[in-house]
Amino acid sequence: MTHRRTGMKFTLLGPLTATHNGKRMPCGSTKQQILLSYLLLHANRQVTVAELIEALWGVHPPVSAVKNIQLYVGRLRRTLRSTESEQRLHTVGKGYLLSAGPDEIDLEHCHRLIQRGTLAWRASERDDAARLFAEALSLWRGRPLSALMGTASMAAEIRCLEELRLMLHENYIEVLLEAGRHREVVSDLQRLVDAHPHHERLRFQLMLALARAGDRLTALAAYRDGYHLLAKDLGIEPCRALRELHDSILTDTVPPVPQQPEGRPRGAVSSPHREADLPSFPEHLRAVSVRP
């Protein structure tokens, strides 16, 4: 039931929007927006009524939940049919399926760019990888599904989207570091480390970029800040890769920008990423999340 290409566009990587030929369409109440968001996150797949009830009300739905779902689906169908003659919200078994083309949902476009960028990175085509990752990042217009941030039922979905964006940013920076473009990433990294102070891979990248740019004192200060934060907030010490990078900065033996490798790209220093840092995506949010 994949839909033909049209002027329809849906955005999830920021405020939820639905447009047809550039004209905004109403997304309705908060419940109506949750319904549309959930169907878009599972586009071209069946979503059962039970799943939608849990998405809209959690474990304590009202007795009228099924009727309310039918009402919301009816409204969404009317909205979509107002712009197209072909129906795209189908009843399938005990649920519904929203059909969407490959270019109609910004999240799907982002996934494809990440996949292409990762393949380019693995082939040591760093310029192409950086361009594709940058294009994927440009699709984000703020916090994903920002109008639904306070809804508990969408918290897990929103968290996965935020982890996807962070992973994408990390990999984009990693490619630039491998290409010797360390000065370009310092300000971005400082902002990201401020927003995610316990994230060791970002702190590692910041220290490495600063050290390669010749700012050893600021790089060492970044390590000290991280050391104290990890000890105070989490009761742990920095991981081995961070400690080794710290020692190499002290002794002025920071590895240089790696030469272009012949196969799978790898830096002269391995970035840390504890298992907790690797996002675990539900199947419908799964992009290429394995770092080269």
Image (spheres, rainbow, N blue to C red):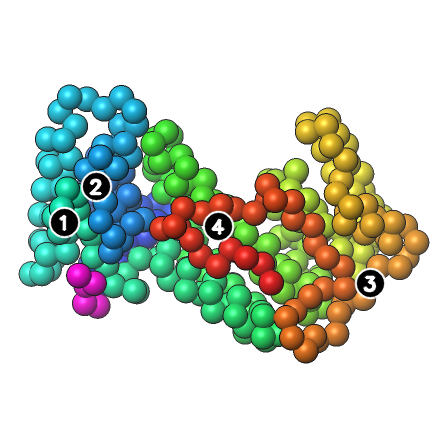
**Cα distance between the residues tagged 3 and 2:** 53 Å
Q: Which residue is mark 1?
A: 92
Determine whether the residue tagged by mark 2 lies in a helix, strand or loop: strand
Magenta: predominant secondary structure element? loop
User: With respect to residue 70, does 290 lie above or below?
Assistant: below
Tell me the kind of residue under disc 3.
Answer: Pro
Of mark 3 and mark 4, the one earlier in the sequence is: 4
Q: Position of residue 109 (x, y in %)?
A: 37, 62
Q: Which mark is residue 164?
A: 4
Q: Which residue is mark 2?
A: 48
Of mark 1 and mark 4, the one earlier in the sequence is: 1
Determine whether the residue tagged by mark 4 lies in a helix, strand or loop: helix
**Cα distance between the residues tagged 1 and 4:** 30 Å
264 is within the stretch colored magenta: no
Q: Position of residue 265 (x, y in %)?
A: 65, 69
Residue extent of the magenta highlight: 1-5
Q: Position of residue 255 (x, y in %)?
A: 82, 63
Q: Which mark is residue 255?
A: 3
User: With respect to residue 287, does 198 lie above or below?
Assistant: above
**Cα distance between the residues tagged 3 and 4:** 29 Å
At label 1, counting other C-alpha atoms closer than 10 Å, the crowd grade (few under 14, some 14-19, many 20 or more) is few
Q: Nearer the viewer, mark 3 or mark 2?
A: 2
Pick out the residue farthest to the bottom: 262
